[in-house]
Amino acid sequence: MSIFPSESSWGNIYSLFGALVSMSGIIVLIKKLKITKKIIISFSYIILFISMLFIIDYLSVLNIKQTPRFSIIKVSSDTAIYYDTSFYDIIRCNKDTKDEYYKIIKNNNYDKENIQKYCKKISSK
């Protein structure tokens, strides 16, 4: 997942493409099983694989201070960016400065004004 920059959507696309390729390999390996076992193994594998992608994405935001790869919505303001992902949200305050920081929050809806207010509220603490 680190070949492409985190702002690029290609990392997201190739990660999901890798999930499909590895899924086809699993299907080839379980060819001799009954159809119900094949379905159970296939669905559990794809759910496990995609959840691992989301966990790695979350840990890279938390530890490496990287923007999330699997963000659904991105709202920008002058000094901040809000990333909406499936399970959490990230606000990137003081973007492109030496005081830049990331704040992981619960799922909320933010617009440009709320993002800047949120960053000012955090920096004043």
Image: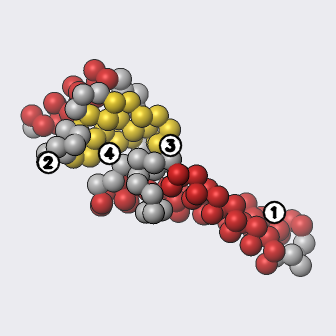
Frontmost of labels 2 and 4 is: 2
**Dot 2 lies on which element?**
loop
| Cα separation between marks 2 and 1 | 50 Å
| Cα separation between marks 1 and 3 | 25 Å
Q: Position of residue 32 (x, y in %)?
A: 89, 79
- Left or right, residue 103 beside residue 108: left
- Left or right, residue 86 beside residue 46: left
Frontmost residue, 97 versus 30? 97
Residue 36 versus residue 104 in the image, above or below: below
Q: Which of marks 1 and 4 is nearer the N terminus?
A: 1
Residue 23 is drawn in which quadrant? bottom right
**Dot 3 lies on which element?**
loop
- Indicate the amino acid at tag 4: Ile
Q: Which of marks 2 and 4 is nearer the N terminus?
A: 2
| Cα separation between marks 2 and 3 | 29 Å
Q: Which of marks 2 and 1 is nearer the N terminus?
A: 1
Q: Quadrant of the C terminus?
A: top left
Q: Residues within 10 Å of mark 2 (few under 14, many from 20)?
A: few
Q: Earlier in the sequence, mark 2 or mark 3?
A: 3
- Indicate the amino acid at tag 3: Ser
Mark drawn on residue 86: 3
Label pair 2/4, CB-CB below 8 angstroms: no
Q: Mark 1 points at which residue?
A: 39
- Left or right, residue 21 beside residue 50: right
Q: Earlier in the sequence, mark 4 or mark 3?
A: 3
Q: Name the residue under label 4.
A: 104
- Indicate the amino acid at tag 1: Ile
| Cα separation between marks 4 and 3 | 13 Å
Q: Position of residue 54 (x, y in %)?
A: 50, 55
Residue beneath the point at 21% across and 46% down:
101
